[in-house]
Amino acid sequence: MKTLMKTLAMVLMALSLSGCLAGKYMCNYALTPTPHGIDDIERTRQKADSLLPGSTAWYDSLKDQGVLKDTTIVGYRDFKVHACYVPAADPARANGTAIVVHGYGDNHLVFLYLVRMYRDDLNYNVLFPDLQYHGYSEGDHIQMGWYDRLDVEKWIEVAHGIFQDDFMVLHGVSMGAATVMMTSGDPLPDYVKCFVEDCGYASVIKQFNYNRKQSFRFIPPDVLQSASLVTKHRYGWGFWEASCEKQLAKCERPMLFIHGDADDFVPFSHLQKNYDAKTKGYKEMWVTEGAVHANSYAKYPEEYKQHVRDFLAKVHDMN
């Protein structure tokens, strides 16, 4: 019996060690990928133009004219974070301010199509940040929207200070959408009127578990618990607490939910989870037929603009 117990103890120690190592690997793999930040800017410039041709030329032109500007603040956890901002095409008649939030591994350049939509088509002032560990922002890991929401809340104040609007919309795609949904459950200034989320996940643990099944089928789900503990120890947050659903349950302001029904990266099923989680206040859902992940605008640009335009008009009428 003593021999058996000793053997079992050794097996458990080996499993514990392997689980810990696997957890560290998963944490590093998911939250500290390379290349990132400034080293990855050129790829994302190309990605921006693939989503809407001419985007970076438009961006560069406005920057050369001094219309589009950069700003940096000290964000959450004392890292410097960067954003760009640009006034509406007709500033004197601006309809409000939009904050556009990018996705995982991207930066402020990638979703220039949304910046252009808000500025040129909807006549909104726009601020569009680099989340921590992305673009020109500092950071020691990808925060999956959870701590990013705290930086976004600082950007809300900055944008209001610049543009002095009493109407603000937050619009995010993928991890940016998760960031927006996570932000929506916190106390916010009255001038933040509504949110648009495009293909955001329901929670970090649900997304990582889905990715595990896709790419690491041989890894048991218990490894995510280990990776979450590593993340908690290193960065102060765990996978289970980073939940859009829990934050949406506290959100009382209007939200537009968008998701492609062919999305196989953030599962289409997450749309309904998020939509159902928001039980207070006005909400809309738009399913884009045949659109893969973060592809709804590219597939239906005019319809996308119209859905956002109509949603914002309704929110304006409510206020």
Image: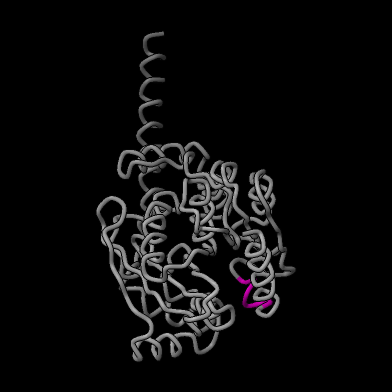
Q: Residue lying at the far top in this picture: please name it.
A: 1
Look at the image and tell me in which quarter the N terminus lies.
Answer: top left
Q: Residue lying at the far right in this picture: please name it.
A: 289
Work out whether residue 217 can be spotted: no
- Left or right, 59 with reference to 64: right
The kind of secondary structure the magenta stretch mainly shows is helix
* Residue closest to the eye, 67 or 117: 67
Colour treatment of the image: one colour
Counting from the top left corner in percent of width and height, residue 31 is at 39, 54
| Residue occupying image coordinates x 45% and y 88% | 58
Counting from the top left corner in percent of width and height, residue 91 is at 47, 81
| Residue occupying image coordinates x 44% and y 49% | 146
Counting from the top left corner in percent of width and height, residue 298 is at 62, 77
Residue 298 is one of the magenta-drawn residues:
yes
Looking at the image, residue 73 lies above or below residue 108 = above
Q: How many marks?
A: 0
| Residue occupying image coordinates x 71% and y 63% | 286
Residue 167 is one of the magenta-drawn residues:
no
- Left or right, 291 with reference to 40: right
Location of residue 305 by image quarter: bottom right
Residues in magenta? Answer: 295-300
Look at the image and tell me in which quarter the C terminus lies.
Answer: bottom right
Counting from the top left corner in percent of width and height, residue 100 is at 48, 68
Work out whether residue 313 can be spotted: yes
Looking at the image, residue 133 lies above or below residue 248 = below
| Residue occupying image coordinates x 47% and y 67% | 165
* Residue closest to the eye, 9 or 127: 127
